[in-house]
Image (cartoon, rainbow, N blue to C red):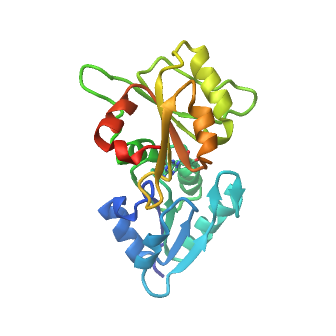
Amino acid sequence: MKKGKVCIVGAGPGDWELISVKGFNRIKEADVILYDFLASKELLNFTKKGAQLICVGKADGIHLLEQDEINLLLFKKAKEGNLVVRLKGGDPFVFSRGIEEALYLKRKGVDFEIVQGITCAFGAPESFGIPLTRRGEVSSVAVLTGRKSNGRPIDAPDCDTLVYLMAVSNIKKVVTAILKSGRPKATPCAFIERGTAKEERSVAGNLGNIISKARSHALRAPSVFIVGNVVEYGKKIYGHKFK
Ligand SMILES: C[S@@+](CC[C@H](N)C(=O)[O-])C[C@H]1O[C@@H](n2cnc3c(N)ncnc32)[C@H](O)[C@@H]1O
């Protein structure tokens, strides 16, 4: 019997063409694909005939299957001798449970591989011409979560550029934490919703007005929130794309 294997593949941020050649090849070869809501659905058009496609739907609080159930399914499908692709949005190790799945598979003795993806933290800003660094001017970037549990405060470290994921529902607390850390209200910032996908959009402003702007444009998840002077470069080269 064929030996099974799991490939944990990053699908990239939204535009299906942003997946790596390696990830794309694994999708074409797979017997079984377990995919998240955030992984681009167009990629499922390239699966081989008869491949089993299972949505394990994980995005912003909606979990069709709990993590334990996903782990078990990966294990079972691989043990049946299948090539299993675990398709995840962005990069599988950036604010994702790819590492938990890899550790589980390691423990269970299942052969696995990790295929990198472009994280939304980098891909979404770039779609609006926002560089996260600039030589001689912007030399540090932090990628953060806008959701903290167990009463821990939101981080706002002393970096030139801050990129928050999962910040939409918590935006008041995120902006308060950033202002408290000493940044002025005039600091440029922008939300990018569904970056790189056809329906992508951005709402830009400053720390003083971004909450009301986001509200008036009915901004939704999935979005990244970028804080820093780099936002101005995006406006210079793709000004027409911003609201
Ligand atoms: C659980 S994290 C997964 C991140 C993913 N592993 C990555 O590397 O892109 C989900 C969050 O990523 C952000 N996100 C994912 N895709 C996005 C996109 N296309 N545009 C903007 N933000 C996105 C949102 O903040 C969303 O709530």
Q: Is residue 84 visible?
A: yes
**Residue at the right extreme?**
151
For the point 57% across and 14% down, the residue is 181
Q: Residue furthest left?
A: 135
Q: Nearer the viewer, residue 240 or 219?
A: 240
Residue pictured at 62% horizontal, 35% vertical? 212
Q: How many numbered discs? A: 0
Q: Residue 215: give x, y in percent of width and height.
A: 64, 41
| Residue at x 42% of width, y 82% of height | 48
Q: Please indicate, yes or no, whether residue 226 appears anywhere in the rendered image.
A: no
Q: Residue furthest bottom?
A: 49
- In the image, is residue 212 above or below residue 90? above
In this orientation, which residue lies closer to the viewer: 186 or 40?
186
Q: Position of residue 161 (x, y in %)?
A: 42, 27
Picture quadrant of residue 15: bottom left
Q: Position of residue 206 (x, y in %)?
A: 50, 27
Left or right, 226 with respect to 170, comes to left
In the image, residue 93 sits, relative to residue 25, either above or below, namely above
Compare residues 129 and 42 and report the one nearer the observer.
129
Corner quadrant of residue 36: bottom right
Q: Position of residue 183 (x, y in %)?
A: 51, 16
Q: Residue at x 42, y 55 (%)?
A: 12
